[in-house]
Image: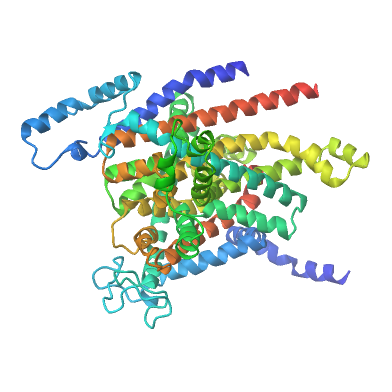
Amino acid sequence: MWFQAVRVEKAPHVFRDTPFRVKTRRLLATAKEVFSRVSTAFGATLIILMLGMAIFAPLLVEPNARGAYQMPRDLSAVAVPPGTPGHPLGTTRLGGDVLYGIVWGSRLSLQLSLYVVSGAVLIGLIVGSTAGLLGGKVDAFLMRVVDIFLSVPELIFPLAIAAILGPSFINIVVALAVIMWARYARIIRSQILQVREEDYVEAARAIGDSRFGIIRRDILPNSMAPVAVQATLDMGHAVLFGATLAFIGLAVAGQAEWGTLVSEGQADIIAGRWWTSTFPGAMVFLWALSFNLVGDGLRDVLDPRTEGR
Amino acid sequence: MHRYIARRLLAFPFVIVAVSILVFSLTRLGGTTIGPYLEPGMTDQEIAALEERFNLDEPLPMQYLAWLGGVFRGELGWSAVAAAPVTVVFRQKIAASIELGVAAVLWAVTLGVGLGTFAARRRNRLPDQLSSVFAVGGASMPTFWLGIVLLIIFWAYLGWFPHGRSDPDIWSSISHPTGFYVIDAVVAGSFQALKDAVWHMVLPALTLGYAAVGIVTRMMRSSLLEEMGKDYVDAARARGLPERLVVRRHARRNAFIPTITVIGLSIGIIFEGSVVVETIFGWPGLGNWMADSVLSGDQATTLAFVIFTSVLFLTINMAVDVTYGYLDRRVVLRKS
């Protein structure tokens, strides 16, 4: 057949493949599979839009001179409805521009989720790999600790911690990371135990690779798929829980933070000002939804065994 | 199996003690917890007397032991927010929370089971995908926002539903022997009070339950799909039973078994959500009290609430595991 002939003619480039090219192509194929589902593609588009908003915030809305994350006060336009010139989404009863809060709030949310997830992954990586690689009593002890952290309520516990540390952005980060690491520790440990038995690790051992080299080159990279799935889901959870804590009152008042804005807009409901709470809360929902959709899509492709746990 | 249950039961008190030590040391991390008990114009002697009364002058491990001793005597400390012993307030407030929680669980399970069945019968078609988006939406929904949006629409604009737990006039018109408003209304035979109780519960229960709809829907859908692939379903079809009855009488009954275990998890989710929902709707329950306590640094209440929630979660998790193991074993026995 003619098209096979063309294929054969093109074939030689395969032999010029570098490991980088192979990896890239494999990554692209996986990405294509992941994003072929409508809901995942929708979530990914939303994520890109919101990340763009967070990264380019200074270009979209001019930062407040008194601090970029502080809500500006336009006293000439207090509590104006959406559509007012200069305030497309309206203002709060203190003259804070709702659009400003949404744009700069996305930056805070991005920071929050990145800090929480990287902190949790780091602690989980240290605890999980220590348990998985050392085994024995260390493993048994660390896993009991993990069990305790997994069994405490994941909203009430951070709520208590954040309350004790005092209201601030960084304390919310700490409170969430302190609870979220346990799941990563468990995932990484079980992955290590599983990957350790694979043929390629044995092969690496046979050709005399050092123990650390095997861990770094073979074991860790191959146990990363479920971690990536969980991290994607937690990017959404971190903002959802963080905004909930902020809503209850554990963030700094007057900040351009979505949960805080919803909380401060609560008093506007009776006055008929629906916009001050509705828009920032919708952003929290979209953020959590998009990361959940992409996380679910990733799980189905990368880690099909745990589907619908 | 019995050994497994026994091991879980034996480990249970140790886990509770570990959690309580963890939480206790955390609540003392911020230094002394005397703050909320102080009043302006107190003399040094009065403050010292207060410290002695709450054991705050002793080293931390002794404070913990004093607290633990109190737990065994049925005392959980003094709630500064409610100006009463924690245990007393707890008993007063828990009925309101349970009432709301039960309504939320009922709504979450009814909708979840219905939607799961609906989605499974239309697998991979548009209704299935829409229902999965609805389910993921529940898991991504900030409860505080959903509550506020519902309040804006149905309370502030349309005026269809009220705010709070009861109309004070109707509430005081009947006696409250149980503390559960719905039950009290039925006991008193007052239709007006029953209507008032249910009417106030609609919005908060909808908000609270939606967070748990997702997991019930997913479990119902996947377990029903699994059942539909089994031989007995084919046999029922071969006997000429209409598809609707095959699902309702055969497959769905068996699909309920794994779904029951998620209902346990949904109770946990709903209990956690109550902190936010009760605050928004002005519902006088545990969650509302907890939110106030957290903000005013009332450590005795915070500690009691966190421990209570942890015990609840541990119990639910264990019950779920044991039920699952038991159900699994029965399935295995039946096969052999």
In the displayed structure, does residue A12 sit left or right of residue B145?
Answer: right
Above or below, comparing residue A98 to residue B244 in the picture: below
- Quarter occupied by residue A45: bottom right
Find residue A268 and report its horizontal and vertical position in percent: 37, 64
Coloration of the structure image: rainbow
In the displayed structure, does residue B322 sit left or right of residue A88?
Answer: right
- Quarter occupied by residue A16: bottom right
Residue at far right of view: B239
Q: If the image is split into quadrants, where does the N terminus of chain A sit?
A: bottom right
- The residue drawn where x is 80% and y is 21% is B336
- The residue drawn where x is 67% and y is 35% is B258
- Quarter occupied by residue A289: bottom right
Find residue B197 and report its horizontal and vertical position in percent: 50, 44
- The residue drawn where x is 27% and y is 32% is B84
In the displayed structure, does residue A17 sit left or right of residue B317?
Answer: right
Above or below, comparing residue A124 to residue A296 in the picture: above
Above or below, comparing residue B318 to residue A215 in the picture: above
Q: Which is more toward the observer, A266 or B328?
A: A266
- The residue drawn where x is 27% and y is 47% is A166
Find residue B155 and report its horizontal and vertical position in percent: 47, 59
Q: If the image is split into quadrants, where does the C terminus of chain A sit?
A: top right
Find residue B57 and report its horizontal and vertical position in percent: 15, 27
